[in-house]
Image (cartoon, grey):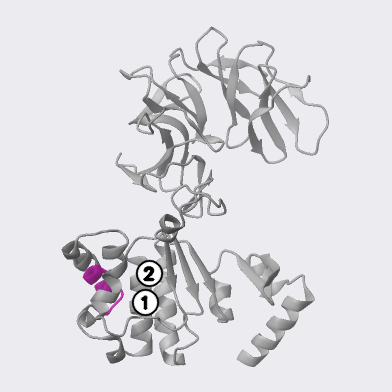
Amino acid sequence: MSDAYLRYPDVHRDEIVFTADDDVWLSDLSGGRAQRLTRDHVRVAYPRFSGDGTRIAWTSCRTGAPDAYVLDRASGAITRLTWWGRNTRTVGWHAGRVLVSSGHEEVTPAVTRLYEVGLDGEVDRSLRSLGLVGAADWDDDGRVVLETATFSHGVFWKRYRGGTAAKLWVGTPAGGFTRLLGDEPAPCEGPVWHRGRILFTSDLSAGGADITDPRADADKIRARIGIVFQHYNLFPHMTVLDNVTLASRKVLRMDKAEAAERGRAMLQRIGIGDKCDVYPDQLSGGQQQRVAIARAIVTSPKILLLDEITSALDPILVGEVLDLVIDLKREGATIMMATHEMSFAKHISDTVVFLEQGVICEQGTPEQIFEHPQRAETANFLARVLDWMR
């Protein structure tokens, strides 16, 4: 293989397929010589393994227009699946069928439709148009997640820090779709389902901004982050409702009536809807912390930061606050939480980070950190804390 661009990699177990030199190649992940699967020397793209790895589909311009082809690895036969052209590309596989997006039935080239194509070339079903479909994945319940791009992004195909601004949609077997993430001007690529959640690659961060960039708008970034403090930090001269709606009114410039309606709904949701007109000093510690959480999440932040939110509570009140955090996680909130509640951290966390004197000492899954710590500092801390808890 010459010094060429290697593009569109797809991995299945210990193998990888990719394009280079206008052909499709296959290689073992352990290294060695790559196998050339095509010798057409025409533009090819998006090779994708089938679920069992026995077939590989890709897009090729063998006849001048892009269409979908599939290789049966056992026989070596390459079959052309479509004769559509017009923005046709392979997206992946579903239930043994090739997923192909194409604009051949659309009026405008800015829109494609997603098709399931059988190995005989017959179309089993198609999904309605939502833009230029770039990737798709189904879960076991028949829900599909789509990545699309449209002309609504100002200058179409404008590169945004390494990717095209895209949208994510979640569909159901009934055919409806829900838009995810709103109008974030950032690439959201390669979505896949994993344990009921959607994973995708993106540089999305606080509304598409790089928070480490010194030119970033700090106020705009802060408006997308919710914080719950260790000691509530509620304004004592304001009612519970005024505390909860302050950011909506002052930062988001929301109408007072609308902010009040959302605030009341949020307080009702967390179980203190009857406390809207009382003041913080008339509440218990657990109720004040619930108000603080409501204040943080009523603006729909992208990230929720929780700083030792149970340390100032009586043991009886700790449980009700932690139950609320569990509910927020189940609803899909992204949470970063500082805590000494080891049992809670072990059972709710996706990733655990252990800090020693303000420095990251060790990080990993809850099982790795709590059951098999690699650092002596982590093991000693857990031994002391867990022994005290017993």
Q: Is residue 39 placed above or below 329 in the rendered structure? A: above
The answer to whether mark 2 and mark 1 are in CB contact below 8 A is yes
Residue sitting at x 22%, y 79%: 276
Which mark identifies residue 296?
2
* Span highlighted in magenta in the image: 263-272
Q: Is residue 390 visible?
A: no
Q: Can residue 224 be seen in this view?
A: yes
Q: Where is residue 264 in the image (x, y as percent from the top left)?
A: 22, 71
Out of 364 and 335, give the one closest to the viewer.
335
Residue sitting at x 67%, y 66%: 363
Q: Distance between the residues labelled 2 and 1?
A: 6 Å
The local crowd at label 2, few if under 14, some if 14 to 19, many if 20 or more residues have their Cα within 10 Å, is many
Q: Mark 1 points at which residue?
A: 292
Task: Specify whether residue 44 is painted magenta.
Answer: no
- The type of residue carrying mark 1 is Ala
Query: Overall secondary structure of the magenta stretch?
Result: helix
Q: Quadrant of residue 129?
A: top left
State left or right for residue 230 relative to residue 152: right
Q: Where is residue 309 in the image (x, y as percent from the top left)?
A: 47, 80
Residue sitting at the far right: 32
Out of 343 and 252, give the one closest to the viewer.
252
